[in-house]
Image (cartoon, rainbow, N blue to C red):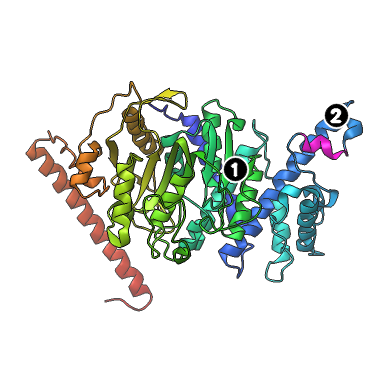
Amino acid sequence: MARPKKSRSEQRRETERSGFEATLWAAADKLRGNMDAAEYKHVALGLIFLKYISDRFDERRAAALADADEAPLVDERDLYVGDNIFWVPEKARWGFLKANATSVDPTIGALIDQAMIDLEAENPRLKGVLTKNYARPELDQTKLGDVIKLFSDLAFQDEHQGQDVLGRVYEYFLGQFAIAEGKRGGQFYTAGCVVKLLVEMIQPFKGRVFDPCCGSGGMFVQSERFVEAHNGKRNDVSIFGQESNPTTWRLAKMNLAIRGIEANLGPKWADSFHEDLHAGLKADFVLANPPFNDSDWGGERLRLGARWQYGVPPVGNANFAWVQHFIYHLAPHGYAGFVLANGSLSSQQSGEGEIRRKIIEAELVDCIVALPGQLFFTTQIPVCLWFLTRDKSNGIVRDQTLRDRRGETLFINARDIGTMQTRTLKVLTDEDIARIADTYHAWREIGGRYEDVPGFAKSATTEEIATRGFVLTPGRYVGAAEPEEDDEPFEEKMARLTAKLRQQTAEGAELDGRIREALAGIGYGW
């Protein structure tokens, strides 16, 4: 299905928004000082969260005061909680904090800490979630007051009660922190374009969505956004998640709360392998980006269990522990889409090849997508997406009639697509995502006009996969792309290339001269 192109006005608004987000980041980043990004992350995001819930409270309060029937109830908690708005005590409201954010008496940090304590006390959903260390000595209180004043101009207003504006700012900050933290940043953040591709592929319109290693909750946010974009309702999707890192678990709770998304992330943070908080859950959709090649997953303590239906995973690598954990939690018609290291496609070590063979022969592998490198903050290597389903046969699933694809698997080689966003980070554009997702849906759905595309897509039989040792690397199946026809006459091409070379040579000589002059200016000429 073709996607409409963005208008110039939409593109201009996006540019303006990105500048707005960058300005906020630059201002907030002044606070960091000597703090590590992992620690500072919660300081900045906590302020955004506090501003948003205070704005929502103030808006509802103003509406009540303007209504003769509601005015007498303006200080009643139920008036706000009934509209899914957090109750904000007077000294936790942004107006109070802004009024006290002065350089003369820099105690704003202590006031923010108390505001967070009061918010948690008044709202059980926030218990143990909010950051409460703004008064620490290493956090410049004068700068903190300045950021409070700057954030005061941030208006969370749109057709979704400001959630779109807030969500965009929040996601931008998460991405910036992931960049700042490098490899560690990937523990809580999955590149937005990868999340969007996963969601576009399995289309979680309705049902239970589960992520047993949910990080900051990005999979859930994109699922909700996808449902709304297709005229669904948020209540059509039930969200379940789990996260083992306590600070990241709090981040996920906050990320979902600011969007009004109801989610069951368990009563605490916990390891999915050793303390499955959703042991009885059978999900309609599993979306996940588990840690790559995790050798410290405690596998030596998990040699038995119902999850290892296709083989006991090796102690030294959790890849196929995750795969089988996802399968275990799938409902009879469930779909799973997840990220794994490329080694999962071909490894024969420690029984991984045998586990992969059994999963393929059980008709679970629907599609494999090879992605380009440099999409993740955690690693520069290319990774892959696995798509599993418990029902590859023809049937009514998700209100769509699907082809009978038993005995077949779709391979998509997308390693050569994507656009460099920075010197080290690549992104998938909307067009890239549409191309991959549309290819999959054309293959999967009755009425879809699917054809193999040399170098990009191939529908392979299980027999073909068996002849390749049950290796799932897409490049082994899709073949080479057809060469593009070159109808430019030889003489014209040589003239064009020669002119280009001449221009580049001249530019190089000019640059050499500038470098020599600069070096001579500081006493290093030759």
Q: CA distance from mark 2 to mark 1?
A: 29 Å
Residue occupying image coordinates x 68% and y 49%: 49
Residue type indicated by callout 2? Ala
In this picture, is 299 found above or below 411?
below
The reply, left or right, for residue 441 in relation to residue 47 is left
Sequence-wise, which precedes: disc 2 or disc 1?
Answer: 2
Is 74 positioned to the left or the right of 127 in the image? right
Q: Which residue is mark 1?
A: 167
Q: Nearer the viewer, residue 142 or 475?
A: 475
Q: Secondary structure at mark 1?
A: helix
* 452 on left or right of 44: left
- Residue range corresponding to the magenta coloring: 75-82
Q: Residue at x 22, y 56 (%)?
A: 506
Nearer the camera: disc 2 or disc 1: 1
Q: Which secondary structure, mark 2? A: loop
Instruction: Say if residue 307 shows up in the picture.
Output: yes
The label on residue 101 is none
Task: Indicate which disc residue 66 carries.
Answer: 2
Picture coordinates of residue 122 (x, y %)? 81, 49
Membership of 294 in magenta stretch = no
For the residues labelled 2 and 1, say whether their Cβ atoms are less than 8 Å apart: no
Q: Residues within 10 Å of mark 1 (few under 14, many from 20)?
A: some
